[in-house]
Amino acid sequence: MAKIKVGISACLVGKKVRYDGSHHWDTYITTVLGRFFDWVPVCPEVEYGLTVPREPMRLEGDPECPHLVTVYTRIEHTEGMKRWAAERINELAEEDICGFVFKSGSPSSGLRNVKVYGPSGRYVKAGIGVFARVIVDNFRFLPLEEDIGLHDPESVEGFIRRVQVYHRWKSLQVERGELKEFHDKHRLLIMAHSPHHLHKLDELVNEPGLHIDEKLNLYFPILMEGLSLKATRRKHGKVLLSAFNRLKIFLNEAQAKDILLCIEGYRKKLYPLIVPRAVVAHYARIFGVNDLLTQVYFNVSAEGGVYES
Protein backbone atom coordinates (compact mmCIF):
# COMPACT_ATOMS: atom_id res chain seq x y z
CA MET A 1 0.00 0.00 0.00
CA ALA A 2 1.44 3.40 -0.98
CA LYS A 3 2.52 5.63 1.87
CA ILE A 4 0.35 8.63 2.68
CA LYS A 5 1.85 12.10 2.15
CA VAL A 6 2.24 14.14 5.32
CA GLY A 7 3.85 17.56 5.68
CA ILE A 8 6.59 18.03 8.27
CA SER A 9 8.86 20.81 9.47
CA ALA A 10 12.06 20.26 7.48
CA CYS A 11 14.37 20.48 10.51
CA LEU A 12 12.65 17.39 11.98
CA VAL A 13 13.85 15.20 9.08
CA GLY A 14 17.45 16.36 9.46
CA LYS A 15 17.63 19.32 7.07
CA LYS A 16 19.99 22.03 8.36
CA VAL A 17 17.57 24.91 8.05
CA ARG A 18 17.36 26.31 11.58
CA TYR A 19 18.42 29.89 12.24
CA ASP A 20 21.84 28.76 13.52
CA GLY A 21 22.45 26.33 10.65
CA SER A 22 21.56 23.24 12.68
CA HIS A 23 18.75 20.72 12.36
CA HIS A 24 16.42 19.14 14.91
CA TRP A 25 16.24 15.66 13.43
CA ASP A 26 13.72 13.58 15.38
CA THR A 27 14.67 9.99 14.65
CA TYR A 28 11.81 8.62 16.75
CA ILE A 29 9.16 10.39 14.70
CA THR A 30 10.81 9.86 11.34
CA THR A 31 11.43 6.16 12.03
CA VAL A 32 8.10 5.21 13.63
CA LEU A 33 5.81 7.36 11.49
CA GLY A 34 8.03 6.93 8.44
CA ARG A 35 6.68 3.37 8.16
CA PHE A 36 3.35 4.88 7.16
CA PHE A 37 4.04 8.34 5.74
CA ASP A 38 5.86 9.85 2.80
CA TRP A 39 7.28 13.06 4.26
CA VAL A 40 6.84 16.42 2.53
CA PRO A 41 9.41 18.67 4.28
CA VAL A 42 8.63 22.39 4.62
CA CYS A 43 10.79 25.12 6.17
CA PRO A 44 8.74 28.33 6.07
CA GLU A 45 11.64 30.65 6.87
CA VAL A 46 14.06 29.29 4.26
CA GLU A 47 11.43 28.79 1.56
CA TYR A 48 10.18 32.31 2.22
CA GLY A 49 13.67 33.55 1.34
CA LEU A 50 15.71 33.89 4.54
CA THR A 51 19.28 32.63 4.72
CA VAL A 52 20.96 29.94 6.78
CA PRO A 53 22.27 30.98 9.24
CA ARG A 54 20.03 33.98 9.98
CA GLU A 55 18.97 36.27 12.75
CA PRO A 56 16.48 34.62 15.12
CA MET A 57 12.87 35.80 15.06
CA ARG A 58 10.01 35.85 17.53
CA LEU A 59 6.30 36.67 17.76
CA GLU A 60 5.28 40.03 19.20
CA GLY A 61 2.07 41.97 19.83
CA ASP A 62 -1.46 40.58 19.90
CA PRO A 63 -1.33 36.81 20.59
CA GLU A 64 -4.36 36.35 18.32
CA CYS A 65 -2.60 38.06 15.40
CA PRO A 66 1.09 38.44 16.28
CA HIS A 67 3.89 39.99 14.24
CA LEU A 68 6.93 37.99 13.12
CA VAL A 69 9.94 40.18 13.91
CA THR A 70 13.72 39.69 13.97
CA VAL A 71 15.04 39.89 17.52
CA TYR A 72 17.87 42.42 17.07
CA THR A 73 17.37 44.41 13.85
CA ARG A 74 13.56 44.56 14.34
CA ILE A 75 12.74 43.65 10.72
CA GLU A 76 9.07 42.75 10.17
CA HIS A 77 8.40 39.56 8.19
CA THR A 78 4.73 38.93 8.95
CA GLU A 79 3.08 39.93 5.69
CA GLY A 80 5.84 38.47 3.54
CA MET A 81 5.54 35.13 5.34
CA LYS A 82 1.77 35.17 4.93
CA ARG A 83 2.02 35.89 1.18
CA TRP A 84 4.51 33.04 0.74
CA ALA A 85 2.35 30.71 2.85
CA ALA A 86 -0.74 31.48 0.75
CA GLU A 87 1.11 30.16 -2.32
CA ARG A 88 2.74 27.24 -0.53
CA ILE A 89 -0.53 25.82 0.78
CA ASN A 90 -1.80 25.56 -2.80
CA GLU A 91 1.21 23.38 -3.61
CA LEU A 92 0.61 21.26 -0.50
CA ALA A 93 -3.03 20.82 -1.52
CA GLU A 94 -1.89 19.61 -4.96
CA GLU A 95 0.49 17.17 -3.28
CA ASP A 96 -2.56 15.85 -1.42
CA ILE A 97 -1.06 15.93 2.08
CA CYS A 98 -3.22 14.26 4.72
CA GLY A 99 -1.55 15.59 7.87
CA PHE A 100 1.23 17.83 9.17
CA VAL A 101 3.86 17.53 11.93
CA PHE A 102 5.13 20.91 13.18
CA LYS A 103 8.27 21.91 15.12
CA SER A 104 7.15 23.03 18.56
CA GLY A 105 8.09 26.50 19.76
CA SER A 106 8.87 27.85 16.30
CA PRO A 107 7.56 31.39 15.60
CA SER A 108 6.67 30.24 12.09
CA SER A 109 5.73 26.58 12.61
CA GLY A 110 4.76 26.11 16.24
CA LEU A 111 1.22 24.80 16.54
CA ARG A 112 0.54 25.72 20.16
CA ASN A 113 2.15 27.46 23.11
CA VAL A 114 4.53 29.57 21.01
CA LYS A 115 5.84 32.50 23.07
CA VAL A 116 4.43 35.92 22.14
CA TYR A 117 6.19 39.00 23.53
CA GLY A 118 4.71 42.36 24.50
CA PRO A 119 6.01 45.94 23.94
CA SER A 120 8.31 45.69 26.96
CA GLY A 121 10.00 42.64 25.47
CA ARG A 122 8.56 40.33 28.09
CA TYR A 123 6.62 37.14 27.38
CA VAL A 124 2.89 37.82 27.62
CA LYS A 125 0.99 34.84 26.25
CA ALA A 126 1.20 31.70 24.12
CA GLY A 127 0.18 31.82 20.45
CA ILE A 128 0.57 29.94 17.17
CA GLY A 129 3.26 30.29 14.51
CA VAL A 130 2.49 32.37 11.41
CA PHE A 131 2.74 29.49 8.92
CA ALA A 132 0.98 27.06 11.27
CA ARG A 133 -1.92 29.53 11.52
CA VAL A 134 -2.27 29.58 7.72
CA ILE A 135 -2.36 25.77 7.66
CA VAL A 136 -5.00 25.66 10.42
CA ASP A 137 -7.16 28.27 8.69
CA ASN A 138 -7.00 26.67 5.24
CA PHE A 139 -6.91 22.89 5.83
CA ARG A 140 -10.05 22.19 7.80
CA PHE A 141 -9.96 18.91 9.74
CA LEU A 142 -6.40 18.11 8.58
CA PRO A 143 -4.72 16.01 11.32
CA LEU A 144 -2.07 18.21 12.93
CA GLU A 145 0.48 17.56 15.66
CA GLU A 146 3.77 18.86 17.04
CA ASP A 147 6.97 16.88 17.52
CA ILE A 148 6.69 16.99 21.33
CA GLY A 149 3.15 15.61 21.13
CA LEU A 150 4.31 12.50 19.29
CA HIS A 151 6.61 11.01 21.89
CA ASP A 152 3.77 9.16 23.56
CA PRO A 153 2.82 5.79 21.97
CA GLU A 154 -0.94 6.35 22.27
CA SER A 155 -0.63 9.81 20.70
CA VAL A 156 1.44 8.35 17.87
CA GLU A 157 -1.16 5.69 17.10
CA GLY A 158 -3.95 8.27 17.35
CA PHE A 159 -2.23 10.54 14.84
CA ILE A 160 -1.55 7.66 12.44
CA ARG A 161 -5.18 6.57 12.62
CA ARG A 162 -6.49 10.12 12.02
CA VAL A 163 -4.27 10.52 8.98
CA GLN A 164 -5.36 7.15 7.59
CA VAL A 165 -9.05 7.94 8.11
CA TYR A 166 -8.61 11.40 6.56
CA HIS A 167 -6.90 9.83 3.54
CA ARG A 168 -9.50 7.11 3.22
CA TRP A 169 -12.35 9.62 3.37
CA LYS A 170 -10.75 11.82 0.70
CA SER A 171 -10.28 8.76 -1.50
CA LEU A 172 -13.85 7.56 -1.03
CA GLN A 173 -16.18 8.03 -3.96
CA VAL A 174 -19.33 8.13 -1.89
CA GLU A 175 -22.54 6.98 -3.45
CA ARG A 176 -25.81 6.12 -1.76
CA GLY A 177 -25.17 3.39 0.78
CA GLU A 178 -21.38 3.80 0.96
CA LEU A 179 -21.53 6.11 3.96
CA LYS A 180 -23.13 3.40 6.08
CA GLU A 181 -20.51 0.88 4.96
CA PHE A 182 -17.72 3.35 5.81
CA HIS A 183 -19.27 4.05 9.20
CA ASP A 184 -19.81 0.39 10.05
CA LYS A 185 -16.14 -0.41 9.36
CA HIS A 186 -14.98 2.43 11.63
CA ARG A 187 -17.37 1.88 14.55
CA LEU A 188 -14.90 0.37 17.02
CA LEU A 189 -12.15 2.84 16.12
CA ILE A 190 -14.51 5.76 16.77
CA MET A 191 -15.68 4.12 20.01
CA ALA A 192 -12.07 3.90 21.20
CA HIS A 193 -11.76 7.68 20.89
CA SER A 194 -15.25 8.91 21.79
CA PRO A 195 -18.39 6.85 22.46
CA HIS A 196 -20.32 10.14 22.48
CA HIS A 197 -19.29 10.94 18.91
CA LEU A 198 -20.05 7.38 17.83
CA HIS A 199 -23.59 7.83 19.16
CA LYS A 200 -23.97 11.11 17.25
CA LEU A 201 -22.71 9.49 14.04
CA ASP A 202 -24.99 6.47 14.50
CA GLU A 203 -27.97 8.81 14.71
CA LEU A 204 -26.82 10.80 11.69
CA VAL A 205 -26.23 7.78 9.46
CA ASN A 206 -29.61 6.28 10.37
CA GLU A 207 -31.58 9.53 10.10
CA PRO A 208 -34.23 8.84 7.40
CA GLY A 209 -35.10 12.48 6.81
CA LEU A 210 -31.66 13.59 5.57
CA HIS A 211 -30.39 13.38 2.00
CA ILE A 212 -27.05 11.61 1.52
CA ASP A 213 -25.34 14.92 0.64
CA GLU A 214 -26.48 16.47 3.92
CA LYS A 215 -25.25 13.44 5.83
CA LEU A 216 -21.85 13.60 4.15
CA ASN A 217 -21.46 17.29 4.95
CA LEU A 218 -22.28 16.66 8.61
CA TYR A 219 -20.52 13.32 9.08
CA PHE A 220 -16.87 14.13 8.47
CA PRO A 221 -16.55 17.08 10.91
CA ILE A 222 -18.08 14.99 13.72
CA LEU A 223 -15.84 12.04 12.82
CA MET A 224 -12.59 14.05 12.90
CA GLU A 225 -13.63 15.85 16.07
CA GLY A 226 -14.20 12.50 17.77
CA LEU A 227 -10.93 11.02 16.54
CA SER A 228 -9.04 14.05 17.87
CA LEU A 229 -9.90 12.90 21.42
CA LYS A 230 -7.40 10.57 23.03
CA ALA A 231 -8.06 6.83 22.97
CA THR A 232 -7.24 5.82 26.56
CA ARG A 233 -6.69 2.37 28.04
CA ARG A 234 -10.11 2.60 29.65
CA LYS A 235 -11.77 3.31 26.29
CA HIS A 236 -9.78 0.59 24.53
CA GLY A 237 -10.80 -1.82 27.29
CA LYS A 238 -14.47 -1.10 26.64
CA VAL A 239 -14.00 -1.60 22.89
CA LEU A 240 -12.26 -4.92 23.46
CA LEU A 241 -15.01 -6.07 25.83
CA SER A 242 -17.60 -5.07 23.24
CA ALA A 243 -15.80 -7.25 20.68
CA PHE A 244 -15.55 -10.07 23.23
CA ASN A 245 -19.31 -9.93 23.82
CA ARG A 246 -19.80 -10.36 20.07
CA LEU A 247 -17.51 -13.40 20.12
CA LYS A 248 -18.46 -15.15 23.33
CA ILE A 249 -21.32 -17.20 21.87
CA PHE A 250 -18.67 -19.10 19.87
CA LEU A 251 -16.14 -19.54 22.67
CA ASN A 252 -15.58 -22.35 25.14
CA GLU A 253 -14.65 -21.53 28.73
CA ALA A 254 -10.88 -21.66 28.16
CA GLN A 255 -11.03 -19.43 25.09
CA ALA A 256 -13.22 -16.87 26.85
CA LYS A 257 -10.82 -16.82 29.80
CA ASP A 258 -7.88 -16.37 27.43
CA ILE A 259 -9.40 -13.22 25.94
CA LEU A 260 -10.57 -11.74 29.25
CA LEU A 261 -7.16 -12.24 30.87
CA CYS A 262 -5.49 -10.44 27.94
CA ILE A 263 -7.93 -7.53 28.16
CA GLU A 264 -7.47 -7.26 31.92
CA GLY A 265 -3.69 -7.46 31.53
CA TYR A 266 -3.79 -4.59 29.06
CA ARG A 267 -5.96 -2.48 31.37
CA LYS A 268 -3.45 -3.09 34.19
CA LYS A 269 -0.57 -2.06 31.90
CA LEU A 270 0.89 -5.57 31.83
CA TYR A 271 0.54 -5.86 28.03
CA PRO A 272 0.64 -3.45 25.12
CA LEU A 273 -2.57 -3.00 23.12
CA ILE A 274 -1.33 -5.32 20.38
CA VAL A 275 -1.78 -8.36 22.68
CA PRO A 276 -5.55 -8.26 23.38
CA ARG A 277 -6.26 -6.83 19.94
CA ALA A 278 -4.38 -9.68 18.25
CA VAL A 279 -6.07 -12.31 20.46
CA VAL A 280 -9.56 -10.99 19.72
CA ALA A 281 -8.78 -10.80 15.99
CA HIS A 282 -7.38 -14.35 16.14
CA TYR A 283 -10.64 -15.80 17.48
CA ALA A 284 -12.70 -13.67 15.10
CA ARG A 285 -10.80 -15.31 12.21
CA ILE A 286 -11.20 -18.79 13.65
CA PHE A 287 -14.98 -18.44 13.93
CA GLY A 288 -15.44 -16.29 10.83
CA VAL A 289 -17.00 -13.32 12.62
CA ASN A 290 -16.83 -11.04 9.62
CA ASP A 291 -18.34 -7.95 11.23
CA LEU A 292 -15.28 -7.86 13.51
CA LEU A 293 -12.78 -8.83 10.83
CA THR A 294 -13.87 -5.91 8.63
CA GLN A 295 -13.35 -3.40 11.46
CA VAL A 296 -10.54 -0.93 10.81
CA TYR A 297 -9.74 -1.30 14.52
CA PHE A 298 -8.61 -4.90 13.91
CA ASN A 299 -7.87 -4.96 10.21
CA VAL A 300 -4.17 -4.26 10.50
CA SER A 301 -3.23 -5.66 7.08
CA ALA A 302 -5.62 -3.32 5.29
CA GLU A 303 -3.91 -0.39 7.03
CA GLY A 304 -0.41 -1.34 5.97
CA GLY A 305 0.33 -1.99 9.65
CA VAL A 306 -0.42 -0.02 12.77
CA TYR A 307 1.80 1.28 15.53
CA GLU A 308 0.78 -0.38 18.77
CA SER A 309 0.82 1.34 22.15
Image (cartoon, grey):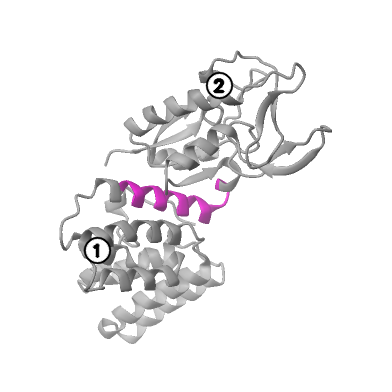
Residue at 55%, 24% (x, y): give it.
81
Q: Is residue 110 above or below residue 151?
A: above
Residue 68 position, x and y percent, is 65, 28
Residue 174 picture quarter: bottom left
Residue 54 position, x and y percent, is 66, 15
Residue at 52%, 53% (x, y): give it.
155
Please check the rendered image and state whether residue 290 is part of the magenta-colored stretch, yes or no: no
Question: Relative to residue 44, is residue 92 drawn left or right?
Answer: left
Residue at 23%, 65% (x, y): give it.
180
Q: Within 10 angstroms of label 2, few (less than 14), some, or many (20 or more) residues?
A: few
Determine which residue is flagged by label 2. Answer: 80
Determine which residue is flagged by label 1. Answer: 294
User: Which kind of residue does numbered mark 2 sit on?
Assistant: Gly
Disc 1/disc 2 C-alpha distance (Å): 49 Å
- Dot placed on the residue nearer the N-terminal end, 1 or 2: 2
Residue 210 position, x and y percent, is 24, 68
Magenta residue span: 150-167
Given residues 14 and 99, the one toward you in this image is 99
Question: Relative to residue 126, is residue 266 drawn left or right?
Answer: left
Res 14 visible: no
